[in-house]
Every structure is written in C-alpha cells, then in structure tokens.
Image: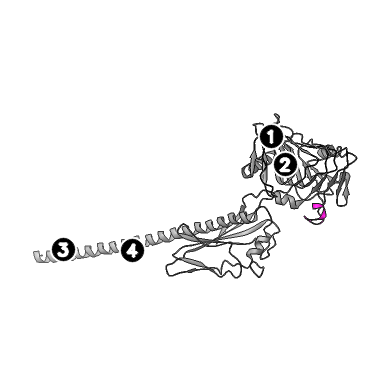
Amino acid sequence: MNHRQETGSALVMAIFVLALLSSMGVALLFLSTNEVKMSRADTRSKQVFYLAEAGMEAGRAQLLILNGATSFSDDLATYAGANGVLDFDTNAVQATYDTDGNVTGLTGYGDDVPLIGATAFAGGWYAAFLTNDAINGTSTNDTNNRVMMTGIGLDSEKSFEIVQAVITRKVIIPPAAIMLLGPTPNFSGGQSNPKLYIGEDCNGTGGVANLYAPLVGVIGTTAESLVESGIGTDPAYTSGPYTGEDTFADLTDPTEPTYIEPLDSVWTDCQALHDLVESFRVIADVVCLDGNSCTLPPSSPSRLIFVDDNYSLNTSGEGMLLVTGDFTASGGISWNGMIWVIGSGDYTRNGGGGGTFNGSIVIANIAGPDNVYGTADDCTGGDGGFSASSFNENGGGNGTTTYCTDNISNASPAFPYKIVEFRQL
C-alpha cells in the first residue's frame, strides 16, 4: 500500500469518527433538552399541586371565619347558587386565560358560587369550592358536621390540578344541663326556695324539638346515687314527661330515660379533658390569671372567657366562661351559654334572686392531690384522674336552670376544621 492510499484511509476514518461524535453530541443534547423539559413539567405539576392545596387550605380558613362553630347548612345553601343544588362538577370546570397566559377565571361550575374565586398566589392561581360530603350528596343539609372542600391550582402554562378534602368541625355539646364528672360528685339543688330545673331543650322555644336532656348527668351508677341524694324537696326537676330522679342520669347508660347519644370520651378521659381545657386557653378572647381583677370582654354569645383562678361572677352575661379554680355566683345572676368549672371543680350559687341559666354547666375536679390546676399532679388524683366535684345551689331565690342547645352551640368555641379525608384528582 502506498502513502497516498494510507492518507485516504485516514481521512475516511476521521470523517467517520467526526460523524459519530456529532451524532453522540446531538443525542446527548436531545436527551439533555428532554430531561430539562421533563424536569420543568414535573416542577410545574408539583407547583400547581401545592397551589391546589393552598386553595383548599385558604377555603378551609375562610369557611372557619364565615361559619365558626355552627352548622354548615347555611353556607352550603349560599354556595349552591340560585337553584339550591350543589352541582359543582370537577370534570367540567375549566380555566380561562388572557393572551399573556394569565388566569382570568373559571367556567363549567354552573350556578354554584366559588368560595374563593381564581386568586393569584406564588406565581400561579388557586380557587376553592364548597360542596357537601358524599353522604349528603348534592343536598345543602348538613347532617353530620362534614363538608367537601375542593382546591384548584393553575399556572400560566395551563397546568391544572385539583385536590379535595372532607373537613369536619369539632362540636362540644355537653349532654346534660349540669354535668358532674368523677366517681364521687356532690350535688345540692337548692333547699330554701323553689327552683326550676328544665331539661326540655330550650324549654320548647328553640333547640331540637322533643329533646329531653338529663338535668344532672354523671358517670357511673354510684355517682348517680350520690347526686340523687341531693335532690331535696323544693326544686322542681322536669324534662319533658320525666320528673324527679328520672331526670338524673348515668350518661354511660343507654337505658336511662333521658339518654341522648353515646358519650364522647372527653368526658371520661381526664387527660383528654385537660388537653381540651388548654386548647380553650389558646383561643380564648381573654385569659385572666387573677380572678379578682378579671375584666370581661364585650358581651357576645360566642365570646370565650378563661379564668385561671378562683372567680366570683358578679354580672349577667353570655358566651362560654371557663374557671379552673372555685366558682361562685349570686342567685340574681343570669347567663346564656356555658359555664365550665374544670380544675378544682367547685360550683356554688348563693344569695337571693331569680336569675336564670340557659345552656349547660360542666364541673370536674382534675386538679390532682394539691387541688391546684396547672401543676404537675393534674389528673393524678381520685379515680382515673377525677376527684370529687361539687354543685351547690343554696341561694334563697327561685332561679331557673334550663338545658339549651341553641345557647350551647352559640357559645361553643370555633376550633380549626379538621381534615378527615384527602385525595388528589
């Protein structure tokens, strides 16, 4: 082989190697570009998912502001639109865009009303819709304290994501006009002048029709026997067709004449009750550490007053009052809502007067051996952490105590709504 032939062979080889390297470079460039596109698509997908979650959370917070602790029915009716039917369909809803790729709104949801319309947030947009849960379907009637919140996330690349969550509201409805928790409660229902204790819900002028609640509710048959011994002769105890001892109930016994429903464990679990009390402290309108100088906020059915001390109520009012020390009030004081004496668990009402109480009273001694709430021995005394609680209404007046779920609901604190189910569509 001569030199000219060798030179030609090397040139062919160089061209082949160059072509191979060029092909590899193009392939790598294509692969790299594809990976960048896939990465961007994945990032966009995650971003709109988080936007949808943000929309759902914003809707949950907005609903809490609008609804508080009351039924969801009125809100469902509002967002169902003119036809009164919740016919929002996740498969039909679509976004509209302007020429710059900005979201201008949503279509395809009929006459339902968005809880939150398309709202710019973090480089994208979100929206939220309120519907009923699967059990109640398209109805606007809330029968189980649960609704569906739908969050929609969007971006300028027309990415679209939907998430849904079933949310529930925490409702604290004591199942008796007067609850005395613990194994050895003391009850004295007024001995000097006639007093009325009425268990028919809101005395038949509101609340739930034909709901006859226990007037004194306790835990266990021994506790029931103890409180029945304090009935006395003058007070009149009536709950619909039931009178006298029939209006006193072991709240764990379904055979009781005025039994309402299975008892929430918070009333029998000392630590759960303690945690509930502390959650009230966090959301209270006012917290008083000195009962003698406690100034109540303006009167409101939904106000929550937390007194971490002994307290003497000297003015009529409404809302929820929680006292961790001993509680006293005069016979002339009236209150609509709830009074909880959870801590040392001692409730006394004395002196003359015809004051009325409409709602529910809850009394429990969970303060432990030192009888001071908020120390290390809370929930370590008595039986299961409960020591003896006491209700004493020894005033000379003829006051009335009435169970009333309307006032209880109005006074129930609005806890953040809890997510019980979640899904990504």
Determine the residue positioned at 53% across, 56% down.
Answer: 54
Point out the frontmost of discs 4 and 1: 1
Residue linked to disc 2? 340
Highlighted range, magenta: 201-210
Marks 1 and 3: CB-CB under 8 Å?
no
Point out the frontmost of discs 4 and 3: 4
Marks 1 and 2: CB-CB under 8 Å?
no
Residue linked to disc 1? 292
Determine the residue positioned at 56% across, 56% down.
Answer: 58
* Distance (Cα) linking label 4 and label 1: 78 Å
* Placement of the C terminus among the 4 image quadrants: bottom right
The answer to which of marks 1 and 2 sits earlier in the sequence is: 1
Amino acid type, mark 4: Phe
Q: Main secondary structure of the magenta part?
A: loop
Callout 1: helix, strand or loop? Answer: helix
* Distance (Cα) linking label 3 and label 2: 98 Å
Marking on residue 10: 3
Q: How is the image coloured?
A: one colour
Determine the residue positioned at 46% across, 63% down.
Answer: 155
Furthest residue in direction top, as rendered = 370
Q: Residues within 10 Å of mark 2 (few under 14, many from 20)?
A: many
Front-most of residues 202 and 379 = 202
